[in-house]
Amino acid sequence: MAQTPSRAPIHIMACDGGKKMAQAVASHLGAPLVESRDVWFSCGEGKFIIEQNVRGTDLYVFQSPVVPHDSHSTYDRFVMLLHAIEAAALSDAEWVTAVVPYFPGARQDKRKGRVREGISAGLFARMLQEAGAHRVVTVDIHNEAIAGMFNPIRCRLENVHLYHRLADFIRSRGLQGDTVASPDVGGMERARMYAAELSAHLVGLSKERDYATVNTVKRSTLIGEVDGCDILLVDDIVDTAGSVTAAVDELKRRGAGDVTIACAHPVFSGPAMERLQQMADRAEREGWRFRVVGSTSVHHPNAPNWFVPFPISSLLADVIGHINGRGSVTSAQLADGPEGLEVFEV
């Protein structure tokens, strides 16, 4: 059988926020990292400059909308990604793929019926395809229905699932426990996939939010039994950590033992670090183990010892290789990945 030809030669390029991840992925693929740079003017305006020829390439543009301790906002970095995509399209790259592991605005995927608000996930999708992206690769997006916000004739969303490799990573470090929990009812399907991978029991929590105050959880109520069980609490995004700490409080109140939080996107904004540190201090006082495992979709230099980073560069490299070779992205996600962490310069 004849081998399916690749789309075009793979090249990797990045905005400043995505450079560490892009370097790691380029190293896995043995692909060239295109020289480029973000330019910011004193008024706050920006532009993106490509320093090399990318004509006719299968070009993957990396950006991280969340970079801790960086002066630029999520919106600044998203607009810089748009600049980079347009620069690539105008430079005649054959294919332009935006690689954005944490998709900005993904939690703004519908109108909640309480206020007159926009649907930012759809707005961002339209902006990416208008800039010239043919495909957007993201990781564990908050709502897979966001794929329908893209026009598939012009741009497609490729949502990469972490559960197979992340579950294996957690198991290899002895952090899986015997029961998987979801911090809210909406995340039960995600928790069910981890429970199946780890042959674990499954419980859930019902989360009651205070919508009058942003990022506020009033209480969590447990659905199931956890007395004497070690828990793997699975979420997609840990932002201010209000949901997961409320969930841990309820789990401990109901007799749970060790607790590991696993998330795709450790955003850790606002009071998150303080809340999680307080939980780690409580665990030390009370004699139980507390860990947070988060992917490198958001890079945290000098993280505390309760945080365990899960590297995703090899997974993204496999996905890009399969896209370039017109292969199955599903098989790339379900393949076993190599051990070891990316080396990120701090």
Image (cartoon, rainbow, N blue to C red):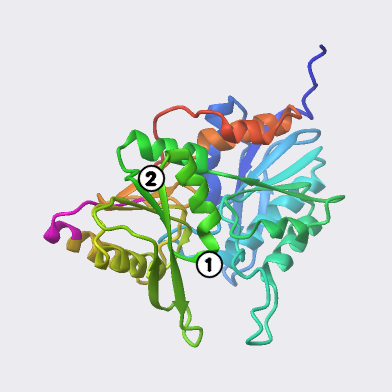
**What residue is pinned by disc 1?**
73
Tell me the quadrant of the picture where the N terminus can be found.
Answer: top right
Q: Residues within 10 Å of mark 2 (few under 14, many from 20)?
A: many
Q: Residue 5 is drawn in which quadrant?
A: top right
The mark that comes first in sequence, 1 or 2, is 1
Q: Secondary structure at mark 2?
A: strand
**What residue is pinned by disc 2?**
309
Residue 131 place in picture, x, y as percent: 78, 56
Q: Which residues are magenta?
A: 283-292
Q: Residue 50 is drawn in which quadrant?
A: top right
Relative placement, left or right, of 187 versus 177 is right
Q: Residue at x 59, y 70 (%)?
A: 44
Q: Amino acid at mark 1?
A: Ser
Q: Residue furthest top?
A: 1
Relative placement, left or right, of 57 versus 207 is right
Q: Residues within 10 Å of mark 1 (few under 14, many from 20)?
A: few
